[in-house]
Image (spheres, coloured by chain):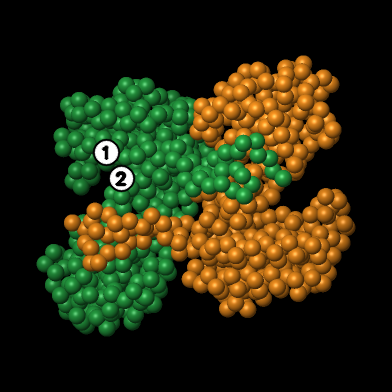
Chain colours: A orange, B green
């Protein structure tokens, strides 16, 4: 499907390799770029977006019209739409990235060794980062901003439904880069909507250092299966709150309610509530009433259904489900060990919380639960780059290698060893 | 080739999957294991090796005999041999690992956020680590020790030429694990010499979290090409020393001599010497004399050959060569920019050094050279886990993601976020 009639790329492999080579060259320049130039580019990009409100909305209208013709549903059309407010938010995001400290060149742990040399680790860009994402055009600006600040070149591949919007945003980004004297190819948006471009992109080992897919399970599975370039995955979140029998009842109810209802369609929302049998009678009836009032559908185990009347039975499949909706699976467990075994078996290693006043259990839960975020007495909704103080986030990694949990500027860099001597030789 | 007649594994896939599942179960136990138990196991493993000198040498003799029958050359037979001294060194290595601080559970950067939650990062094991290596049986003990201390389970695949030695060492490791009450399956040595086992191993995504190949280029290329499990690569080292025209001449000569001649067959030895034209006359004649005395063959560019008589011309291929031998390519360059361009084009991003007294050039070289170790006025031979204070190393990563440069216990772990609240919910 070629959704865009303006588009006539002749040889896809050639085109993609040209982008790759240009990114490699720009990446080397970006690694050396001074902090002031990068920050100036970010500010200029924000300015260009605000100066282009009309163009951006006109190009976005073309995407929306084509989307309607292709029968996109209301939710997708809403995600696709650029309003004045959303454009202002994009611009503000870029300004905030400009204000973050530059991670590139930071030297950590510099120390003298017995041989007399000094050894430390300098933070440096990864090189070229490929981002593959769906529908929301604001990712174009956010991802470009984070990669730019961390000294990387970026190749962006947005959804075909947003191609006109993404091109218009890319023009603003390019304007910002050029006005700050940085290479325009530091951020390149793939201009074709040909789906085969993704296949080419994920195999360009020589030109791309890491691929970050942002989108639904289908996209991430396709990218992972085809990729030869390393992938930083952001998989689904089947997050748990476990209410221990030594929990403070008020905290337990507040956290379980917040983790489910503060927002539904996000990966750090709770999908399964686990309750120790010793406290189930004290928390479940009240919680069930609160959920009912909010319109949250409960699906319970047998014990839960004896305590809360009139709810559906959870099937085995419910424990593995990421609802992203006002639906919650509830299970009464014997104790923390049974809760941890449930999380081990059904969780997605994203974010899990224990509510307890017992410090020995809190210590064990923190150490033994193998998830990217493990919490005590806090809502799973805090698993977020902004809340953690990263300043911004490009996603939440459920991988273990390289970066785990919310990924900010640091996750887009690596460290090299730096050694200072004064003529030192190895004995 | 099935080099070992005792060996009759029926279904390789079944066998490998059983190892994988056992490793997964043992890995969970190891992640929880107390520091004292891990250290006791390491000490007991060292004790068991020292108590088994006769058995180890007898089994090793079988490998050596088979090696001779198969026509292994003297260098390979030497690497394969276990002497009393080499066994004592293995045992001492395990005792040293026991003495290193346990990285598991260390919490870094714990800080209060504006929301009131505390956020930090806890170091945790990767899970199951697969090691694929060649000939030297001491890797069996070293790799097992490092993976054990970092709380991981390990599957080890040694070379078929060392199978009897590796099994005997594995028996000592198992004895040590059991005596400390740790799961014997925390370290498993693949018992078949069937080459297809490597192919199975690198595709066991569900059971292995990372593969570390240790060996020649052929092994690493094969593993990388076939692997579905992430690979932490340790590629070759085409390391450079650049002597700047503002170098201290004595330091330059000492470093260039040490980096090439202190040991030849190692990845951090210098393979190409770059010399600024302004200083070439002052350093090259003396250095050439020193190299000649040591029996190092020089291959030079045209300018080098005008300064040093009677040496061979370097071909284009020489600049990309990892000799691992008493051979050195020498090139005279205009200045640091030309040196950095040469390193960018021909280096393997392992370790590169500048010799200069000029701090502005040192700063630029440190920032701009994209190698796992970048040095000023120090021999490339320092690029080593022990010299850097890691206590031990499992290899030197030339990858950028996850771990770069010498990899010690930290590189065998990851970090998860830990969040402490007191009933905190997201607003």
| Residue depicted at x 45% and y 32% | B31
**Helix, strand or loop status at disc 2:** loop
Q: Secondary structure at mark 1?
A: helix
Residue B372 figure quarter: bottom left
The mark found on residue B391 in the picture is 2
In the picture provided, is B84 more to the left or to the right than A81?
Answer: left
Chain identity of mark 1: B
Q: Closest to the observer: B238 or B63?
A: B238
Q: Which mark is residue B96?
A: 1
Q: Earlier in the sequence, mark 2 or mark 1?
A: 1
Image quarter in which the C terminus of chain A is found? bottom left
Residue name at image x 69 percent, y 43 percent? B426
Residue B238 appears anywhere in the view: no
Labels 2 & 1 near each other (Cβ < 8 A): yes
Numbered circle sitting on residue B257: none
Chain that bears disc 2: B
Q: Nearer the viewer, residue A126 or A199?
A: A126
How many C-alpha atoms fall within 10 Å of the one at disc 2: few (<14), some, or many (≥20)?
some
B351 vs B423: above or below: below
């Amino acid at each position: 499907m070629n959704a865009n009639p303006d588009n006539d790329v002749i040889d896809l492999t050639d085109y993609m390799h040209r982008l790759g080579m240009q990114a490699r060259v720009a990446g080397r320049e970006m690694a050396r770029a001074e902090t002031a130039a990068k920050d100036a580019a970010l500010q200029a990009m924000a300015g260009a977006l605000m100066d282009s409100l009309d163009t951006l909305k006109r190009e976005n209208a073309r995407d929306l019209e084509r989307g309607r013709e292709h029968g996109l549903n209301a939710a997708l059309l809403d995600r696709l739409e650029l309003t004045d407010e959303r454009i202002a938010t994009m611009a503000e995001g870029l300004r905030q990235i400009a204000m973050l400290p530059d991670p590139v060149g930071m030297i950590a742990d510099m120390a003298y060794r017995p041989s007399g040399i000094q050894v430390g680790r300098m933070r440096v860009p990864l090189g070229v980062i490929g981002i593959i994402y769906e529908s929301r055009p604001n990712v174009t600006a956010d991802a470009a901003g984070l990669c730019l600040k961390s000294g990387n070149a970026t190749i962006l591949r947005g959804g075909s439904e947003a191609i006109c919007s993404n091109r218009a945003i890319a023009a603003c980004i390019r304007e910002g880069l050029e006005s700050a004297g940085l290479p325009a190819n530091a951020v390149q948006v793939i201009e074709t909507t040909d789906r085969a471009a993704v296949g080419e992109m994920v195999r360009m080992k020589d030109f791309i250092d890491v691929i970050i897919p942002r989108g639904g399970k289908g996209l991430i599975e396709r990218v992972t299966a085809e990729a030869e370039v390393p992938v930083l995955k952001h998989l689904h979140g089947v997050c748990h709150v476990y209410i221990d029998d030594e929990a403070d009842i008020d905290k337990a109810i507040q956290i379980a309610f917040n983790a489910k209802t503060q927002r539904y369609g996000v990966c750090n929302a709770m999908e399964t509530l686990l309750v120790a049998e010793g406290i189930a009678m004290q928390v479940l009836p009240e919680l069930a009433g609160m959920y009912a009032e909010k319109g949250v559908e409960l699906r319970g185990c047998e014990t839960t259904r004896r305590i809360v009347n009139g709810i559906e039975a959870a099937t085995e499949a419910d424990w593995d489900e990421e609802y992203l909706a006002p639906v919650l699976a509830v299970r009464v467990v014997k104790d923390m060990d049974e809760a941890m075994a449930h999380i081990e078996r059904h969780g997605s290693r994203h974010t899990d919380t224990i509510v307890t006043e017992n410090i020995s259990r809190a210590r064990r839960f923190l150490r033994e639960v193998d998830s990217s975020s493990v919490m005590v007495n806090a809502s799973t909704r805090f698993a977020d780059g902004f809340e953690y103080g990263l300043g911004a986030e490009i996603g939440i990694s459920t991988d273990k290698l390289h970066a785990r949990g919310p990924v900010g500027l640091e996750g887009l860099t690596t460290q090299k060893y730096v050694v200072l001597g004064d003529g030192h030789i190895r004995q």
